[in-house]
Amino acid sequence: MNHIFKHIPVMKKELIDSLKIKKNGIYIDSTFGTGGHSNEILKKLGQSGRLYSIDRDPIAFSIGSKIKDSRFHIINENFSKLLDFAKNEKIIGKVNGIIFDLGVSSIQIDDYRRGFSFKNDGPLDMRMNPNYGISASEWLFESNIKEISFVLKNFGEERFSRKIAYAIKRRSQIKKITSTLELANIIKKTIPTKNKFKHPARRSFQAIRIYINQELEEIQKALESTLKILKPGGRISIISFHSLEDRLVKKFMIKNSTKAIIPYGMPITEEQLNRLTTCKLKIINRILPTQNEINNNPRARSSVLRIAEIQE
């Protein structure tokens, strides 16, 4: 089956420039997607350079597998496994740069069959790798009101989380919710629409997707791995698309770029002891998309690019 996706990478030039690519360096694209960033990195690498790309989505992996370049290697895996992958490839402490383009990709959102979109009808799945885990439809059917409400509130920042959870379970008692438009319409009928430009199901779909794919846990684990994988002077560049992602990234960078402050008389952990004298990261920059880019690519609207560097 042929898969054609129109994808416009957000802040592509800024992201690639932020790496300050060395021709013979080693780089990791943790979110291959349709390969926009990986192909740009390959253009800048010399014959001895290497690029490793990762994506849990089997379609993304299939796209990457078509790249015939001895400098390039792709793996079909969650990016939380970055450290294991780096150990296998014997590149711990040797990597010059790692990039993350977080959130959902065009492969997922633009294909109604994947169940991510609240605008087009499709099976209610939402798994980034459909071969693993439980679908959104099964999870909503098996979960109770309290569990659904918790997810909607904490991962979607949805004010009407409990009201939506009640409506979902009422419908589930009649029949299992199996399609995206079915769920979107339940939510639309349940809560008021204040902004005609924002679909009332947007936050709930985001929350369910994040939960089903364990996205925040994945990000946290991957971020911690970068500190061991990057070499001194190596850079980490991350594009996030919503406040939950960006908060995690910002907190990670601040924590590892500031020395620990220990109140007098308090016990000191090993981690705090290490941070008393040295910082692992140096924050380089925070970049927002230009208005021109937002006009050309509305998906860029909420994006934030954060860049940090491993201390020499």
Image: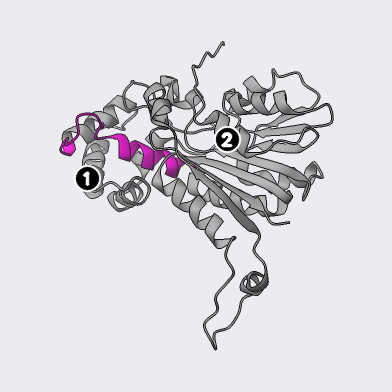
Q: Where is residue 131 shown, x and y percent of the image?
A: 56, 31
Assign a secondary structure to mark 1.
helix
Image quarter (top left, top right, bottom left or bottom right) of the C terminus? bottom right
Q: What range of the chain is rendered magenta?
A: 190-214
Which corner quadrant of the image does residue 52 belong to?
top right
Instruction: Please indicate whether residue 143 sits to the left or right of residue 88 in the image.
Output: left
Q: Is residue 226 visible?
A: yes
Q: Is residue 55 visible?
A: no
Answer above or below: position of 286 versus 40. Answer: below
Q: Where is residue 234 shown, x and y percent of the image?
A: 70, 47
Q: Residues within 10 Å of mark 2 (few under 14, many from 20)?
A: many
Answer above or below: position of 104 versus 250. Answer: above
Which numbered tag is attached to residue 166? Answer: 1
Instruction: Please indicate whether residue 162 sits to the left or right of residue 12 in the image.
Output: left
Which corner quadrant of the image does residue 302 belong to?
top left
Residue lying at 44% horizontally and 32% vertically, measured from the top left: 126
- The residue at which mark 2 appears reads as 15
